[in-house]
Image (cartoon, rainbow, N blue to C red):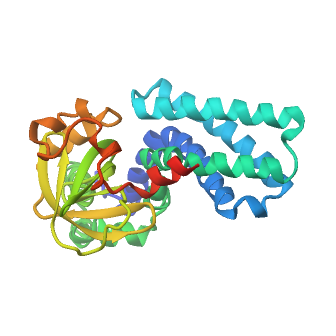
Amino acid sequence: MKYTIPFRALPYLFSLFMAATGSSAQAAGDKICSSVIQLEGISRKGSKSQVEGDRHAAIDLLNTLVTNLKSATDSNANLALVRVGAKLEREARELQSLQGSGQGKGTGFDQILHRFLSRNLGELALVYNVFGCDDLKSVNTIFKASETEYESQSFGGMQALLRKIQMVSASIWAGLILALSAAAYGIFKMRKRTRGARKLCYTSMVVRWGGDCTFTHILDISRRGMKIEAAKGDQIGEGWIDLYFCGHKVQGKVVWRNKYYSGIRFRERISPRVLQSVVGTSGKPLEETGFEENATSCYSKGCHLTCVHHLKTEISEEKAAS
């Protein structure tokens, strides 16, 4: 009895397996991200351009977000998410109360709604990053990759070999060995792609900019670098800066920034142990992350509240002003 392996079926079987195991979690994340992105879109319009539909949509989106966050935190011990969900739930009740009392119409309520969205930008940003909303498109694309992409990226080197062997019509045992080899090769390629993948978190840290410093948060991190809440005045390519977090001191450089976030490239890769310590202390106060084991010499608890050398982050300054 002769047997050949249909090579073209392997990518589809692999993608079906991945989609089946991750579909429910991905669907929940999609719903949360959808609410956050639409709320941010309404916020960007500003209080002067609100329309009746935006008022109702914002409250409906907020209620949907709160409900989905509750479901997510039932199986997720991320304390930062729990706090965010509780705060948004309180404010949603307040908005509904104002709407029901007759203040939910006209420019007065538009301004209240805009202030609410502005002062909760940090909370929405945390949810956005924890659920990897900016990665959803690329994640979905993995499962929709064409046969050509799979053949060229994951199994390109094996394909020619398999076809040559199939032309000789291999036995059942040879076919099984080839199938296992192809699967192992695919897994190796997938792991190689994600080796430098970032880890999502919300971990407190301190940055030294020459004579100034900033109390801020890490939003995601890999062994090569991190994304943090941006400080006012930090500049791209200023030189190496000191980063203090979780009992570690490393050096990095700002390689990109926008209004709210900065991208930092480490001078040297951090170890897997350091990476895990950052992820493991997500959502904890600075003093509970091990920070003081190797802290900057000028630091004392709460010093950033009165220090003239402290540079606030854009997010914290907007929240303080709202």
Where residue 162 sits in the image (x, y, percent)? 24, 66
47, 136: nearer the viewer: 47
User: Taking 111 as reference, is 292 left or right?
Assistant: left
Residue 223 seen: yes
16, 90: nearer the viewer: 90
Residue 270 seen: no
Question: Residue extending furthest bottom?
Answer: 237
Q: Who's the residue at 74% across and 37% down the image?
A: 95
Where is 191 relative to 141, above or below?
A: above
Count the numbered circles shown.
0
Where is 285 relative to 188, above or below?
A: above
Q: Quadrant of residue 264?
A: bottom left
65, 51: nearer the viewer: 51
Where residue 207 sits in the image (x, y, percent)? 23, 54
162, 319: nearer the viewer: 319
Q: Who's the residue at 43% across and 49% down the image?
A: 129
User: Taking 297 as reference, is 316 left or right?
Assistant: right
Q: Who's the residue at 79% across and 31% down the image?
A: 97
Where residue 230 sits in the image (x, y, percent)? 37, 59
Where residue 238 sits in the image (x, y, percent)? 22, 74
User: Taking 175 as reference, is 122 left or right?
Assistant: right
Where is 173 relative to 153, above or below?
A: above
Where is 141 relative to 315, above or below?
A: below
Q: Quadrant of residue 170?
A: bottom left
User: Taking 92 as reference, is 21 left or right?
Assistant: left
